Image (tube, rainbow, N blue to C red):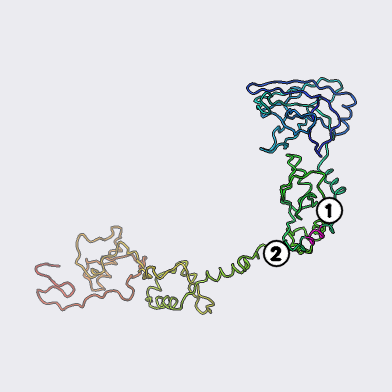
Amino acid sequence: MQTHFKESPFYEIRELLLGMFSLEVSPNHRQNVSRPLSLSSELCSRLRADPTLRLLLFCAVDQPLGPYARHDIAFPNQVEVRVNGEEVKANFKGLKNKPGSTRPTDITEYVRKVAQYRNTVLITYALTQKAIGANRLQKFNCSVYLVRKHSVEDLTKRITQRNVITKQSVINEMLKRANDPDIVVDSVNMSLKDPISTLRINTPCRSNLCNHNQCFDAESFLQLQEQAPTWQCPVCNKTVSFEGLAVDQYVQEILDSVPKGTDQVTIQPNGEWSQANKPENQTIRNGHSAAQQDDSDDDDDLIDITDSRISAIKNEVAHTPLSMTRTTPLSSREASTAPRAGSKRTSEVIDLTLSDDDEPVRPAKKVAYSTPSSLPDPSRRYQLPFSSSSSVPRSLSHSQSYSQSQSQSQNGLPIGQVRLDFRPASQNIRNPYGDYGPHPPPRHPSYSGQGSGGYPSYGSSSP
């Protein structure tokens, strides 16, 4: 008794090489089933010469009406296949809850193409399910066939040469729906992208059982069915067959007429179409284009700065003391915003980060000059009597002391008295008070017992 499998457009069964053998029920333990496979010299030559000839391992669930029905490809849940001791790397499971989405396993590369060589096919399986009937448990039947495989390109050419949906038949169907008083037909947008690969359609294809005008790419659809055969329309999910696929000439003419960058077209009820190719940045939203909305948003972001704020800033600059403006250096921001003298001011730069609630502008700090350590207190810059604690540099030579005595006598100072602000002649120190330094008090006439005019006596103190 031989099991018959459902036909597939991707391969054509030519010859049975290894007859049916069963995988008995094994709900708890692992089971091994081994079968020999030998090839004739003629078959080995054909396999070497024709790469489209393949050796496929088929497997299906055993059913009571097996000889009279077509079976889907199905393997046990846990299965391992080895040919000549080498594990076959293949997917033995299809899509979940999709019966018939499993493919037969290709073992051509694992079989030695030597005449009368004893190849070994070993199948290890476990945990087969109970089902089918009260007195019957589930088991699987396997076979090895010689098949001829068909590529996706060959199948696509076969569709274009065999089945065609003419342009006039498509237009007649549109006019029929438009003239039906019970149906309201409006213009629709038809995409020119494949719903499977999301790429531009090359060969527009649909089933003759589908009522929609939307097409899919024939090559992309066949590639998907080769991996996991479900044979469902990607647009309406109807069950389709390879024999029912056809090329839509109406859509093919549209694809040949529009540029490659066009994604969709608008189809009228009478069959006329127009290109719907609007830039992405002009998408209509709420009756306005996106570009117009962006312009309105830019207008809302503009902030009106009143003249009072600018005049207040000018007043602050105008009331700044002249001495501060001379001594305080400009910061980087002030230097960049200050207008140049004698140049025409074209625009005013205003810092928008400022706020009315910010702190008022602080006055510029006075420049602190470093006073040399040898300078005494300005209030005591007048003549003091000589004392032994007077700080006179020890490094002064005898000639320097003599010149100092001569200068003191010329300035009205007694010999032996020195000023505390003595400096070498080579050191030029700027007066920190400029022309506005403190003036010495007027000299009082000296009276007997009152001390000298420069140093009056206080109490019983003596100079």
Q: Nearer the viewer, residue 247 or 442?
A: 247
Q: Nearer the viewer, residue 177 or 249?
A: 177
In the image, residue 8 sits, relative to residue 189, either above or below, namely above
The answer to which quarter of the image holds residue 52 is top right
Q: Secondary structure at mark 2?
A: loop
Q: Position of residue 353 (x, y in %)?
A: 46, 67
- Name the quadrant of the N terminus: top right
Q: Which mark is residue 165?
A: 1
Circles 2, 1 touching at the beta carbon (< 8 Å): no
Please state if 151 lies on the left or on the right of 303 as rendered.
right
Residue 434 magenta-highlighted: no
Q: Which class describes the residues within 10 Å of circle 2: few (<14), some (14-19), or many (20+)? A: few
Q: Nearer the viewer, residue 76 or 316?
A: 76
The answer to which quarter of the image holds residue 277 is bottom right
Residue depicted at 11% across the width and 74% down the height: 450
Q: Which mark is residue 266?
A: none
Residue depicted at 21% across the width and 59% down the height: 389
The magenta span reads 170-176
- Tell me the chief SS of the magenta region: helix
The amino acid pointed to by label 2 is: Lys
The amino acid pointed to by label 1 is: Ile
Q: Position of residue 247 (x, y in %)?
A: 82, 51
In the current view of this chain or complex, which residue is farthest to the right? 42
How far apart are the two marked residues, 2 and 1, measured between alpha carbons?
A: 30 Å
Q: Which class describes the residues within 10 Å of circle 1: few (<14), some (14-19), or many (20+)? A: some
Query: How many labels, in total?
Result: 2
In the image, residue 217 sits, relative to residue 395, either above or below, namely above
Q: Position of residue 441 (x, y in %)?
A: 21, 76
Q: Nearer the viewer, residue 131 or 386?
A: 131
Please state if 394 lies on the left or on the right of 77 as rendered.
left
Residue for badge 2: 278
Q: Position of residue 426 (x, y in %)?
A: 37, 65
